[in-house]
Image (spheres, helix red, strand yellow):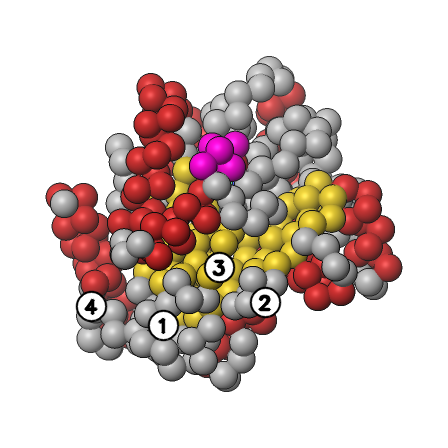
Amino acid sequence: MPGRRKFLQTSLFGGIAVLLRKNISPLTEVEQPFTKGNPIVISTWNTGLEANKAAWKILVANGRALDAVEEGVKVTETSLNCCVGLGANPDRDGFVTLDASIMDESFNCGSVAFLERIMHPISVARRVMEKTPHVMLVGSGAQQFAIAEGFPIEEQKLSPDAHKNYEQWLKTSEYKPVINIENLQKTHGPSTPTGQSGEFNHDTIGMLAMDANGNLSGSCTTSGMGFKMRGRVGDSPIIGAGLFVDNSVGACVATGQGEDIIRISGSHTVVELMRHGLSPQEACKKAIERIVKIKKAKAKEIQVAFIALNNKGQVGAFAIHKEFDYAVHTNTEEKLIKSPSWF
Ligand code: ASP
């Protein structure tokens, strides 16, 4: 329980700072009076703050959660100096390959993996869901489908940041797929095992929303692990691993080392735990505990985080390591919450 108490304090103090600025009264995680009719959107990392704003415009106008989670993460996909989309770090052969998934309130879902030269993989994932009898398209087939659907094919070119990171990585070409251990990256900057630098060292945005009708949807989009093996696909486009939504229970999205999220069907596991009565935060913690037990001492070397939203509009998160945060936007507040963590 100390972890939970600490989390409540952290989120409360963080919240107060924003709320003082916004002149509205503070709420804690457990007291959020979200019921059906009150929309909410949450998303991973600090890049979620901007993404949530775009999603909120749709939610506040009585739009569908599905539209909100698509438009929200498109903001991050477009920001070419960031961590997601075509501006992100390439694979070890120097190509940016993208994965994305989307899921609505009726178990409709779509995803793309190993997609190249398309700006908005999340929208292609939605087309897969709406326009094909399939759930997942990959590689050149996904690209062919995107082009047929009118998505422009972009130039094959690394962003300046990604170029710099790749040059740096090439010096050792060390293949150590370690993701998002924030403390390490803050200390070591671009020479960390992932070679990622600066503030934007996360490769994924995951977003969950509940609209005014009480319907849930989720989205997840990523360039995957920086300097991954060519052809490597993570958890993000795999329904049940990177993302899962069951409108009668709740929704979950993951970030971090995809292989270990896939191993336990992470997001589906969190939703099932909520079905059995756990709060979003307790469910995320239990799933993280499962990974930590499987990985044993190696858990110290990886980061995984889950965020979850139940159908009452309550939110929660849990990560293996410190420094994971997630952005929340409701009728009354917009804030970044520091997630509790195992270590
Ligand atoms: N989960 C993503 C992957 O493994 C990476 C991330 O979240 O940073 O592809």
How far apart in space, not on screen, are marks 2 and 1 (Cα)?
Answer: 17 Å
- Circle 4: element type: helix
- The residue labelled by disc 1 is 330
Asked where in the image residue 30 lies, by quadrant, the reply is bottom left
Tell which circle, 1 or 3, labels the residue nearer the N-terminal end: 3
To which residue does mark 2 refer? 71
Q: Amino acid at mark 1?
A: Thr
Alpha carbon separation for disc pair 1 and 4 = 13 Å
Q: Is residue 260 magenta-colored? A: yes
Q: Which residue is mark 3?
A: 245
User: Ligand 1 within 8 A of label 2's CB?
Assistant: no
Q: Amino acid at mark 4?
A: Glu
Is residue 337 or residue 109 the one in the foreground?
Answer: 109
Q: Give the SS element for disc 2.
A: helix
Q: Amino acid at mark 3?
A: Val
Residue 101 is inside the magenta segment: no
Q: Are marks 2 and 3 in contact (CB under 8 Å)?
A: no
Start-end of magenta stretch: 259-264
